[in-house]
Amino acid sequence: MTVAKGHADQVIERFSKPGIIEQQEGFVDIKIMQKKQRRGEEEVIVMITWESETHWKQWEKSDVHIAGHRANRGKSKPDYMLNMELGMYEVKAVKKAAGKAEISE
């Protein structure tokens, strides 16, 4: 997400609060990262990890997830929110501290 200068903390706070997603089967974690930069627009990345694509799809189709989006339908995005991009990535390898790589298929 790209937000206006001075607003990254609002996004970080929103995604850091406890929520229903943490209680979902297959949920692993949420990582919230802020790009280091000195001035101008700010960038925040929210990375949600699931045990499997099946678990993610269960969340996407769940009544609680759909209800949350319906509650926000018709509401305009905050003025400080400049750009939002959604992507889905598949983990291909994880390198551990001991130097061992695991490859998921």
Image: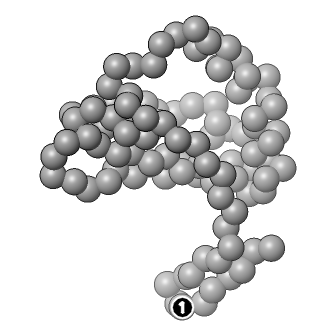
Asked if one can make out residue 28 in the rendered structure from this viewpoint, the answer is no
Q: From what the image shows, is residue 38 above or below residue 6?
A: below
Asked if one can make out residue 100 in the rendered structure from this viewpoint, the answer is yes
Q: Which residue is mark 1?
A: 99
User: x and y percent of residue 84 in the render?
Assistant: 48, 36
Instruction: Provide the secondary structure element on which disc 1 rests.
Output: loop
User: x and y percent of residue 76 in the render?
Assistant: 48, 13
Q: How many marks?
A: 1
Which residue is the extreme one toward the top? 74
Q: Residue at x 73, y 22 (%)?
A: 66
Name the colouring of the figure.
Answer: one colour
Q: From what the image shows, is residue 66 above or below residue 43?
A: above
Q: From what the image shows, is residue 33 above or below residue 79?
A: below
Which residue is the extreme one toward the bottom? 99
The quarter of the image holding the C terminus is: bottom right
User: x and y percent of residue 82 in the render?
Assistant: 37, 31
Q: From what the image shows, is residue 90 above or below residue 85?
A: below
Left or right? Give the position of 24 relative to 31.
right
Q: Residues within 10 Å of mark 1 (few under 14, many from 20)?
A: few
Q: Residue at x 60, y 90 (%)?
A: 100
Which residue is at the front of the view, 4 or 29?
4
The quarter of the image holding the N terminus is: top left
Which residue is at the front of the view, 51 or 4?
4
Q: Residue at x 58, y 42 (%)?
A: 86
User: x and y percent of residue 29 in the render?
Assistant: 58, 51
Quarter holding residue 37: bottom left
Which residue is the extreme one toward the left? 38
Q: Residue at x 33, y 30 (%)?
A: 10
Give amino acid for label 1.
Answer: Gly
